[in-house]
Image: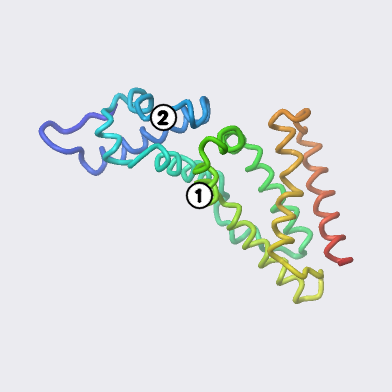
């Protein structure tokens, strides 16, 4: 537990440490037990803090979960993402993106977040809104759509709706490997994942060239 200075509020450094400790413990509880099973009381007890201290930082559990999700997703994002969209050919760029996207989607943290949404979105519809706001899917679609539009302007492919094509590309890359990693079949090996990305990109580009 972070010690406070005697006779006053915690310093800026101490306050930051308390915030990090709170997010660390909340993330562990959410990912291990789910959203519904974790109460503010349980989180506060785990952190050895009062509920008053908790509410000083977060208005409710939903706001805390949004902060936890944002933190986890930010850590999954690759550094210098703009360089990922540079390359000699569209195929090479899409292969690199597919590998990185798949690696992030199959990380333990990403799978745990996905399980929470699937399991508890009906009881807690606000979770879907949180992930829509904090997730990186919309950003990825926007960036990939711009890449496809650029390739279309050069005559390399034909895509009537680049945003739709970008979203379909993401689903093609992630869908089956993610379901299998979550128990709907055996998880794919590294060799299978490499072949999956290669064939997915080839199929996607063939479709765009023939459309």
Q: Crowding near pointer 2: few (<14 within 10 Å), some, many (20+)?
A: some
Q: Nearer the viewer, mark 1 or mark 2?
A: 1
Q: Secondary structure at mark 2?
A: helix
Q: Residue at x 52, y 48 (%)?
A: 129
Instruction: Locate residue 144, reporting x and y percent.
Output: 67, 61
Q: Residue at x 42, y 32 (%)?
A: 26
- Of 195 and 48, nearer the camera is 48
Residue 134: mark: 1
Q: Are marks 1 and 2 in contact (CB under 8 Å)?
A: no
Instruction: Locate residue 173, reporting x and y percent.
Output: 74, 48
Q: Secondary structure at mark 1?
A: helix
In the rendered image, the quadrant that contains the C terminus is bottom right
Which residue sits furthest right? 210
Q: Residue 115 vs residue 189: left or right? A: left
Instruction: Locate residue 73, reporting x and y percent.
Output: 53, 45
According to the image, label 2 marks what residue?
Answer: 25
Number of marks in picture? 2
Instruction: Find residue 86 and report its image quarter.
Output: bottom right
Instruction: Locate residue 60, reporting x and y percent.
Output: 36, 39
Label 1, label 2: how far apart the Cα atoms are: 19 Å
In the picture shown, does residue 25 fall above or below 128? above
Q: Residue 148 vs residue 27: left or right? A: right
Sequence-wise, the earlier of marks 1 and 2 is 2
Q: Residue at x 61, y 60 (%)?
A: 83
């Amino acid at each position: 537990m972070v010690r406070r200075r005697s006779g006053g509020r915690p310093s800026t450094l101490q306050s930051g440490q308390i915030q990090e400790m709170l997010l660390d413990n909340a993330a562990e509880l959410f990912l291990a037990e789910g959203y519904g099973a974790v109460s503010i009381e349980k989180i506060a007890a785990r952190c050895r803090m009062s509920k008053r201290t908790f509410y000083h930082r977060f208005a409710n559990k939903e706001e805390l979960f949004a902060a936890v999700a944002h933190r986890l997703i930010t850590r999954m994002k690759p550094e210098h993402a703009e360089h990922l969209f540079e390359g000699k050919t569209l195929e090479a760029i899409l292969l690199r993106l597919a590998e990185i996207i798949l690696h992030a989607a199959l990380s333990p943290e990403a799978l745990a977040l996905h399980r929470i949404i699937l399991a508890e979105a009906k009881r807690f519809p606000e979770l879907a809104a949180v992930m829509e706001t904090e997730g990186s899917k919309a950003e990825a679609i926007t960036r990939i759509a711009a890449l496809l539009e650029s390739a279309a302007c050069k005559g390399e492919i034909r895509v009537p709706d680049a945003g739709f094509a970008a979203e379909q590309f993401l689903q093609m890359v992630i869908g089956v490997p993610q379901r299998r990693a979550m128990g709907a079949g055996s998880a794919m090996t590294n060799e299978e994942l490499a072949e999956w990305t290669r064939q997915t990109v080839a199929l996607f580009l063939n479709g765009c060239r023939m459309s």
